[in-house]
């Protein structure tokens, strides 16, 4: 699995209120939430996003604050499927997987990326390649179950698929 796009960089301690302000929590529609992504940080930020061609890069403690599932949904709804960060707030990290958003924690490696860099995330090799600078940084491989949750589109579709196909569930347990 490979994902590519231009880096959109943010700083440290971006909280869920910055990702999606509370006034927009009247819906859980990703497309609607996506139109307001990062509005708590910069009302014009969303104009930088090219759906399917932008990757979010952030500093330390991304997604801190409240535990709302709306934050990863807003990022997905804006058209981004990956967040690369130094570190994540634990609840955001798990919510991201549950919603189908790939969070990649790379420690100080996040400084290898600048705004607008062309990046490629190669899940097979476990590397993020900076096509602009020519560099690459590794990331830890995802556990098989987490990859399966992402491939299914999140935790709910993953569970639904396993319930509908008991044979697949038994193979996974073997």
Image: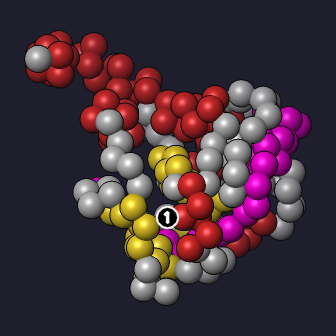
Residue range corresponding to the magenta coloring: 1-25
Query: Which one is in front, 104 or 74?
Result: 104
Q: Is residue 31 above or below residue 121?
A: above
Q: Which residue is outermost to the bottom? A: 133
Q: Is residue 59 visible?
A: yes
Instruction: Name the residue located 58 percent from the left edge and 31 percent from the top edge.
Output: 95
Magenta segment includes 172: no
Q: Quadrant of the N terminus?
A: bottom left
Q: x, y percentage for residue 94?
A: 54, 31
Query: Label 1 belongs to which residue?
Result: 52
Is 13 magenta? The answer is yes
Q: Quadrant of residue 151?
A: top left
How many labels sit on residues? 1
- The type of colouring in the image is secondary structure
Kindly identify the residue that appears in the image at 25 percent across and 57 percent down.
124
Q: Measured from the top left, where is residue 35 in percent x and y? A: 72, 54
**Which corner quadrant of the image does residue 126 belong to?**
bottom left
Is residue 37 toward the left or the right of residue 78 in the image?
right
SS for callout 1: loop
Q: Local crowd at mark 1 within 10 Å, few (<14), some, or many (≥20)?
A: some
Q: Is residue 152 above or below residue 167?
A: below
Residue, x 61% and y 54% (percent of image)?
86
Of residues 164 and 104, the one drawn nearer to the viewer in this rendering? 104
The quarter of the picture where the C terminus appears is top left
Residue 43 percent across, percent down from the top left: 86, 61
15 sits left or right of 146 in the view:
right
Whether residue 36 is visible to the viewer of this picture, yes or no, is no
Nearest to the observer: residue 40 or residue 133: 133
């Amino acid at each position: 699995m490979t994902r590519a796009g231009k880096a959109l960089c943010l700083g440290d301690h971006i909280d869920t209120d910055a990702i999606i302000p509370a006034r927009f929590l009247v819906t859980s529609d990703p497309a609607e939430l996506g139109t307001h992504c990062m509005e708590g940080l910069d009302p014009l930020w969303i104009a930088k996003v090219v759906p399917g061609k932008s990757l979010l890069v952030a500093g330390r403690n991304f997604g801190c604050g409240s535990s709302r599932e709306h934050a990863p949904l807003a990022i997905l709804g804006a058209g981004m499927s990956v967040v690369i960060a130094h570190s994540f707030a634990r609840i955001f990290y798990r919510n991201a997987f549950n919603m189908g958003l790939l969070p990649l924690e790379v420690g100080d490696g996040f400084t290898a990326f600048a705004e607008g860099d062309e990046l490629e995330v190669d899940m097979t090799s476990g590397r993020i390649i900076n096509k602009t600078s020519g560099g690459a940084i590794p990331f830890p491989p995802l556990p098989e179950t987490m990859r399966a949750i992402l491939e299914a589109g999140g935790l709910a579709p993953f569970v639904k698929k396993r319930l509908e196909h008991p044979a697949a569930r038994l193979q996974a347990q073997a």
